[in-house]
Amino acid sequence: MTGPAPHAEPRTILLVDDEPSVRSIIVKILRRAKFTVLEAESGAEAHRIVEGHSGKIDMVITDLFMPGQQGPEVVEALSALRPGLKVLFISGYADHDLVARTGLDDGAHFLQKPFSGRQLLAAVGGVLEG
């Protein structure tokens, strides 16, 4: 699998997804690519993690549709704590009208589920390096 260019220090990604099986697969892919991964199953848990994490968080990967807060709401709340967060939204919904109704702007980075490990790492690299 190809991924982002090697970085001097490990990069940290916060993954927010309500599906344990999806989180598990994404975590494995990212850790194999030498990322440090913080996991949250909800926006509220992500908020607690960010508040309690003293190190840098390079990027957030969040599901677009989750119970409670949706992806854009999660990112808005986290960005208040960590301005300038880089973000990749993921979703299994193929309905582009539904995606548009979340308030996701046209310039947002988005990856449609299901995706391969190679596609995930390419998207992560694009967000981190872009």
Image (cartoon, helix red, strand yellow):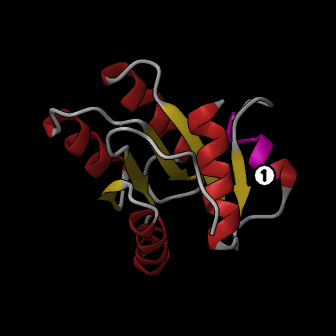
Which residue is located at x 17 percent, y 38 percent? 53
Image position of 15 (left or right of 114): left
In the image, residue 71 sits, relative to residue 32, either above or below, namely above
In the image, residue 55 sits, relative to residue 31, either above or below, namely above
Which residue is located at x 86 percent, y 49 percent? 97
Which residue is located at x 52 percent, y 32 percent? 86
- Please name whichever residue, 97 or 35, is drawn nearer the observer in this view of the structure: 35
In the image, residue 75 sits, relative to residue 93, either above or below, namely above
List x then y, in percent, for residue 127.
62, 38
Image quarter (top left, top right, bottom left or bottom right) of the C terminus = top right
Given the image, on which type of amino acid does mark 1 rest? Leu
Query: Is residue 102 rendered magenta in the image?
Result: yes
In the image, residue 129 sits, relative to residue 22, either above or below, namely above
Which residue is located at x 48 percent, y 46 percent? 6
Image position of 73 (left or right of 88): left
Estimate how packed mark 1 is, as few (under 14), some (14 to 19) or many (20 or more) residues with alpha carbons within 10 Å.
Answer: few
Image quarter (top left, top right, bottom left or bottom right) of the N terminus = bottom right
Check disc 1 and report its element: helix, strand or loop: helix
For the magenta stretch, what is the residue range? 98-103
List x then y, in percent, for residue 37.
33, 56
Residue 3 found in image quarter: bottom right
- Please name whichever residue, 29 or 20, is drawn nearer the observer in this view of the structure: 29
- Please name whichever residue, 22 or 130, is drawn nearer the observer in this view of the structure: 130
List x then y, in percent, for residue 61.
50, 49
Query: Is residue 2 rendered magenta in the image?
Result: no
- Please name whichever residue, 85 or 66, is drawn nearer the observer in this view of the structure: 85
List x then y, in percent, for residue 84.
47, 20
Residue, disc 1: 98
